[in-house]
Amino acid sequence: MQIRDKDDNESEDYILQDNKKTRFGAIFIIIVLIILIAAVAMTGVYFDYW
């Protein structure tokens, strides 16, 4: 899986393209994962697991 170059207009079989939708999706997924990790950590602290 490769990221498509801006100059490469011929190939369309790349999953990750360098555009706004891909950047937004990646940032959104990273933020959601960080929130989930923080929630699990806070739950562990709250129930005195750590």
Image (spheres, helix red, strand yellow):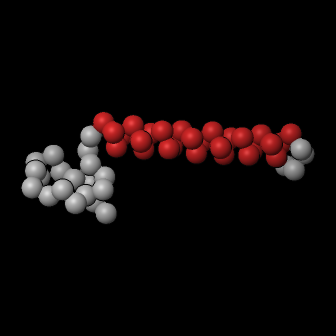
Query: Looking at the image, which residue is at 31% across and 63% down?
Result: 1
User: In the rendered image, which quarter is residue 12 located in?
Assistant: bottom left
How far from the left and from the top, in percent, is residue 4?
22, 53
Q: Looking at this view, is 50 or 28 the one in front?
A: 28
Q: Is residue 9 left or right of residue 31?
A: left
Q: Is residue 44 left or right of residue 12?
A: right
> In the displayed structure, would residue 8 be above or below residue 22?
below
Q: Which residue is outermost to the bottom?
A: 1
User: In the rendered image, which quarter is residue 25 located in?
Assistant: top left
Q: Is residue 26 left or right of residue 21?
A: right
Q: Looking at this view, is 45 or 6 the one in front?
A: 6
How far from the left and from the top, in percent, is residue 8?
11, 52
Q: Looking at this view, is 50 or 6 the one in front?
A: 6
* Callout count: 0
Query: Looking at the image, which residue is at 18% across and 51% down?
Result: 5
Q: Which residue is outermost to the right?
A: 48
How far from the left and from the top, in percent, is residue 17?
26, 49
> In the displayed structure, would residue 10 be above or below residue 40?
below
Q: Is residue 17 left or right of residue 49?
A: left
Query: Looking at the image, which residue is at 51% across and 43% down?
Result: 30
